[in-house]
Image (spheres, grey):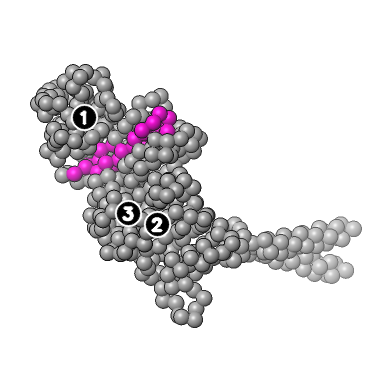
């Protein structure tokens, strides 16, 4: 009787595993992805079902009744810029390899419409760009010229959202790398260089909803006047803009700026942490409310030479306007750069501004102070400094001051990247293989085979004993 019980259990095991394997195969999510995937291949033959341009693939989706959840898989090659129109949602455009898929933008191209910003235009919702290189040239024709842009004045950016992940975006002294003025944008594990402003946002009508976090994480930004810069000022917010795990480097002559500003109360919180900065200015404007600065910038980041932090409000008061702070460790001094003229007409500063600033800087340096507070000559003669002039005053680290040795800094959780100071491209970290799709099904079939072997062994044993 025990032998028969063993046979029954073995048979049921095989039956259940085979049934599960077959069911998994029938419901394989990979099948659904394949059904909604179109291929782009610059070298495709004329009779091929593959598209030769990314725009042609997008247009084919735009012409369908179902415009949601498509994947455009782009094979290695060189491609022209493209536009994702409104109405398309949950679209992923993914390159075969980061260096192999090259999209050229802003290179003396004609503007197709007033909402064409010369580069990749994203006007759809929940669009993702992954694993490609974008070459932006040097165009600065229009005010919103960008390698990648969400600007669409007719809609005011409503309903537009974008994620850029694992891309290289390179300009030749161009204006904007990634420009957004819409509901949501995230930039992760990208290398951006050669722009006046690497990531620029002008969100007059938008804020980050309470409980949500928008991420600028795991990026390497080099040779840009502004790494991350912009403001929010509309709607009910209170969510977090997280700037973390990035490597940002400016030059001795021109600091790279990381600046977050809110133009209306409670539109966002700033969390700047776990970054590696060198020749960088961190600036927070109008974020003095309780909890609006999540992490202390000077303590939560690894700071190399010539880094400092500015906290400011606009409009200011005689009690507080702009306060400059250098790291507590290390030695250095405050310096008037001459890059900005504090007395230009558009700054609307009062007579005596330059003498006032020179006096405050001289006294701070004489006292060895790492804090510089600038408000005004008196309450009727306030002086605009950081809120209008970002490069007028720098902290300069002493030349013989030892700086932190660059060490690998982990990227954000789940980013699959490691950022090392001075390294333009994140190094991939192998991730665990998927347990669904073809590989998951294969595992179930192996289990079924093992069960079958167990049953065969039992039958042989039964026969011998008989």
User: Does the stretch in magenta take in 281?
Assistant: yes
Image point (83%, 70%), residue name: 464
**Residue highlighted by disc 2:** 121
Image point (39%, 41%), residue name: 203
> Disc 1 to disc 2, how far (Cα)?
36 Å
> Disc 2 to disc 3, how far (Cα)?
9 Å
Label 2 residue SS: strand
Label 3 residue SS: strand
The answer to whether the residues at label 2 and label 3 have Cβ atoms under 8 Å apart is no
Q: How many marks?
A: 3
**Residue highlighted by disc 3:** 146
Locate residue 123 relative to residue 419 in the image: left or right: right
- Percent from the top left, x then y, of residue 363? 12, 23
Label 1 residue SS: loop
Region in magenta: 254-282
Q: Is residue 266 above or below residue 200?
A: above
Main secondary structure type of the part rendered in magenta: strand
């Amino acid at each position: 009787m025990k032998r028969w019980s063993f046979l029954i259990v073995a048979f049921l095991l095989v039956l259940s595993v085979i049934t599960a394997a077959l069911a998994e195969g029938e419901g394989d999510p990979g099948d659904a992805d394949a059904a909604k995937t179109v291929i782009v291949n610059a070298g495709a033959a004329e009779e091929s079902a593959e598209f030769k341009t990314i725009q042609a693939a997008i247009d084919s989706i735009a012409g369908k009744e179902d415009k949601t959840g498509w994947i455009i898989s782009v094979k290695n090659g060189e491609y022209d810029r493209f536009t994702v129109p409104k109405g398309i949602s949950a679209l992923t455009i993914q390159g075969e390899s980061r260096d192999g898929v090259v999209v050229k933008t802003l290179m003396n191209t004609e503007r197709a419409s007033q909402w064409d910003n010369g580069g990749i235009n994203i006007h759809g919702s929940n669009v993702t760009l992954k694993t490609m290189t974008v070459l932006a040239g040097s165009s600065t024709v229009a005010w919103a010229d960008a390698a990648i842009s969400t600007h669409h004045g007719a809609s005011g950016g409503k309903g537009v959202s974008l994620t850029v992940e694992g891309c290289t975006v390179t300009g030749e002294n161009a204006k904007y790398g990634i420009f957004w003025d819409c509901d949501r944008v995230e930039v992760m594990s990208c290398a951006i260089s050669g722009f006046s402003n690497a990531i620029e946002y002008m969100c007059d009508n938008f804020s980050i909803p309470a409980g949500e976090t928008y991420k600028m994480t795991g990026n390497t930004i080099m040779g840009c006047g502004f790494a991350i810069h912009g403001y929010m000022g509309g709607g009910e917010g209170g969510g977090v803009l997280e700037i973390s795990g990035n490597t940002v480097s400016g030059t001795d002559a021109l600091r790279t700026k990381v600046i977050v500003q809110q133009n209306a109360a409670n539109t966002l919180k700033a969390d700047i942490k776990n970054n590696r900065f060198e020749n960088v200015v961190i600036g927070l404007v109008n974020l003095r409310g309780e909890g609006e600065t999540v992490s202390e910038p000077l303590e939560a980041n690894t700071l190399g030479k010539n880094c400092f932090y500015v906290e400011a409000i606009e409009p200011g008061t005689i009690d507080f306007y702009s306060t400059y702070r250098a790291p507590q460790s290390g030695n250095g001094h405050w310096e008037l750069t001459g890059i900005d003229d504090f007395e230009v007409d558009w700054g609307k500063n009062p007579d005596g501004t330059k003498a006032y600033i020179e006096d405050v800087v001289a006294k701070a340096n004489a006292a060895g102070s790492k804090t510089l507070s600038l408000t005004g000559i008196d309450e009727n003669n306030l002086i605009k400094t950081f809120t209008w002039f970002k490069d007028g005053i720098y902290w300069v680290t002493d030349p013989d001051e030892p700086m932190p040795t660059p060490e690998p800094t982990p990227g954000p959780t789940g980013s699959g990247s490691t950022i090392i100071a001075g390294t333009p491209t994140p190094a991939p970290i192998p991730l665990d293989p998927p347990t669904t799709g073809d590989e998951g099904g294969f595992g179930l079939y192996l289990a079924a085979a093992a069960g079958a072997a167990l049953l065969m062994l039992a039958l042989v044993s039964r026969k011998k004993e008989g």
